Image: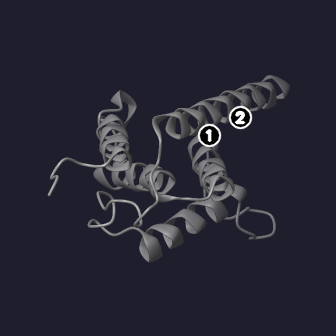
Amino acid sequence: MDSRPSKAEYIRENHFNFFTRFGSLKNVLKRTREFYIRSLCLVLQEKNLETASEILEHIFTVALFETEGNHLTDGSPMESELSKKYLQHKISTSLHPTTLGEPDAEGEETSEEDALKFDKRILEGSKSMLTASEERFKLI
């Protein structure tokens, strides 16, 4: 029996180690750091690319907003608060410590090419969201 990790396990573990070493997460509160790491791990666990993109959008919404909570005028939740609640709910219902390193379902193999396409799409989406965010701040 082969005890080596599958390609998908190897990719997930490398990304997890990469997330935990982000310099910008080292000097923040432990709860904040864990929130972002767990949110990023949601992306790693997701099998559906559209859902992974949606999770990333929520992560960037929380990270790029300067404030959170409710609007002062009408008391409705801000977009960042809604995204934070969405991520907290996803974390509490789907992220378990034992599932990060679990191999894919039987007969389902993730190729390196698939992983590279996934990483490239995440990178392109991140760049476009950052550009849109920069444009938004220029208008202020």
The amino acid at mark 2 is: Met
The reply, left or right, for residue 74 in relation to residue 18 is right
* Relative image position of residue 103 (x, y in whole percent): 33, 59
Quadrant of residue 80 in the image? bottom right
Q: Label 1: how many residues lie within 10 Å, few (<14), some (14-19) or many (20+)?
A: some
- In this view, 40 is above or below 46: above
Out of 115 and 82, give the one closest to the viewer: 115
Out of 76 and 2, give the one closest to the viewer: 2
Quadrant of residue 83 in the image? bottom right
Residue lying at 15% horizontally and 52% vertically, measured from the top left: 3
Q: Earlier in the sequence, mark 2 or mark 1?
A: 1
Quadrant of residue 18 in the image? top left
Q: Residue furthest top?
A: 138
- The answer to whether the residue labelled 2 contacts the one labelled 1, judged by CB atoms less than 8 Å apart, is yes
* Relative image position of residue 106 (x, y in whole percent): 40, 66
The reply, left or right, for residue 75 in relation to residue 121 is right
Secondary structure of the residue carrying tag 2 is: helix
* Relative image position of residue 131 (x, y in whole percent): 74, 25
